[in-house]
Amino acid sequence: MAIFISLRCELRGEGRSRFTNTRCWSDDNDDPFVMAADTKRSASDCMNDLFSDAKGAGWRKINGGWVCPNCIKHIATQTDNSTHEA
Ligand SMILES: [Zn+2]
């Protein structure tokens, strides 16, 4: 048996990106993922790989949640500054 572990973008809204002109990676199921063996040890090791893959692909942890590159781009264009990087 194996466990499928995938990141989901923290800024993805109900069913889709809350940003109309920027598709969230999670809307396209384009999230980083790993397959781990069904042990806590393996899951933990694989999650480290998952986070380093995500960073390499441009994901960032913002306010405690992972955010995809497209949503990060959108945040950068906003002027109201409502989301602060942790
Ligand atoms: Zn996103």
Image (cartoon, grey):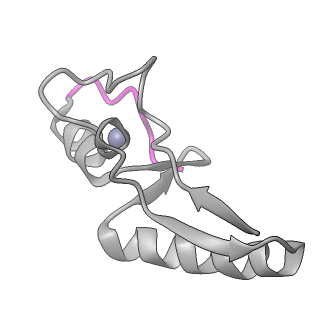
Tell me, yes or no, whether the highlighted magenta stretch contains residue 2.
no
Considering depth in this image, is 61 or 36 the residue closer to the camera? 36
Residue occupying the point 76% across, 72% down: 43
| Ligand 1 falls in quadrant | top left
Please determine whether, in this image, residue 36 is positioned above or below residue 69.
below
Considering depth in this image, is 9 or 30 the residue closer to the camera? 30
Considering depth in this image, is 58 or 49 the residue closer to the camera? 49
Q: Is residue 71 left or right of residue 55?
A: left
Magenta stretch secondary structure, dominant: loop
Tell me, yes or no, whether the highlighted magenta stretch contains residue 85.
yes
Please determine whether, in this image, residue 75 is positioned above or below residue 85.
above
Considering depth in this image, is 57 or 75 the residue closer to the camera? 57
Q: Position of residue 76 (x, y in %)?
A: 22, 43
Tell me which segment is drawn in magenta. Answer: 79-86
The quadrant of the rendering that contains the N terminus is bottom right
Q: Position of residue 86 (x, y in %)?
A: 54, 50
Please determine whether, in this image, residue 2 is positioned above or below residue 31.
below
In the orientation shown, which residue stands out farthest toward the left? 21
